[in-house]
Image (cartoon, helix red, strand yellow):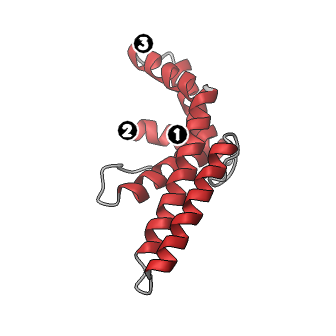
Amino acid sequence: MSPKNVRELEEVASSVGVQLLKIGKIIDVQWTASSHHSTKAVWVDYAALHADFVNVFNDTMRSSAERVSYQTLANQLCSIQFVKNLGLMCDVLEEQISLSLGLQKNDMNMVDAHNKLILQKQALAYTKEHPNFFECGQSI
């Protein structure tokens, strides 16, 4: 992202009272953790991202290709399915991180690992039964 775009995004974020989280690179050794961080950043910064995309689309000083690109991004962000997928992905990645960290503890034994897996399965089943209930950070 260009410095101009970063500056504009920060201005929009401050105008809607959002502190931007660093989204960062997804390609990382700890894929789950970095993906969760990126997903949660989009979830938390949703309003600022959408406002910035709309501002760029309305900026007549931008090229038509750039404006169309940002309009497409804004439209995708407004999709109900996008929001549901983002919330689900955030919650599932959060559960996966919790399980992974629990299984890596030095005092983990087979009984505790089995119990953690059962709890993980129950949490994912709950997510499946309540598809529109997300706990990822704060609501949009």
User: Dot 2 lies on which element?
Assistant: loop
Q: Which residue is mark 1?
A: 9
Return the residue nearer the eye: 32 or 121: 121
Q: Is residue 18 visible?
A: no
Q: In the image, is residue 116 above or below residue 78?
A: below
* Quadrant for the C terminus in the image: top right
Point 56% across, 31% down: residue: 82
Amino acid type of the residue that numbered disc 1 sits on in the rendered structure: Leu
Q: Which residue is mark 2?
A: 1
Q: Report the residue that reaches farthest toward the top.
A: 64
Q: Residue at x 66, y 48 (%)?
A: 134
Residue sitting at x 46%, y 15%: 68
For image coordinates 36% across by 49% down, the residue present is: 26
Q: Earlier in the sequence, mark 1 or mark 2?
A: 2
Query: Whole-percent x and y of residue 62?
Result: 43, 19
Look at the numbered discs 1 and 2 and tell me whether their residues touch, using CB distance below 8 Å. yes
What is the x, y in percent for residue 137?
Answer: 64, 55
Q: Which mark is residue 64?
A: 3
Give SS at disc 3: helix
C-alpha distance separating marks 3 and 2: 18 Å
Q: Residues within 10 Å of mark 2 (few under 14, many from 20)?
A: few
Disc on the earlier residue, 3 or 2: 2
Looking at the image, how many numbered discs can be counted on the residues?
Answer: 3
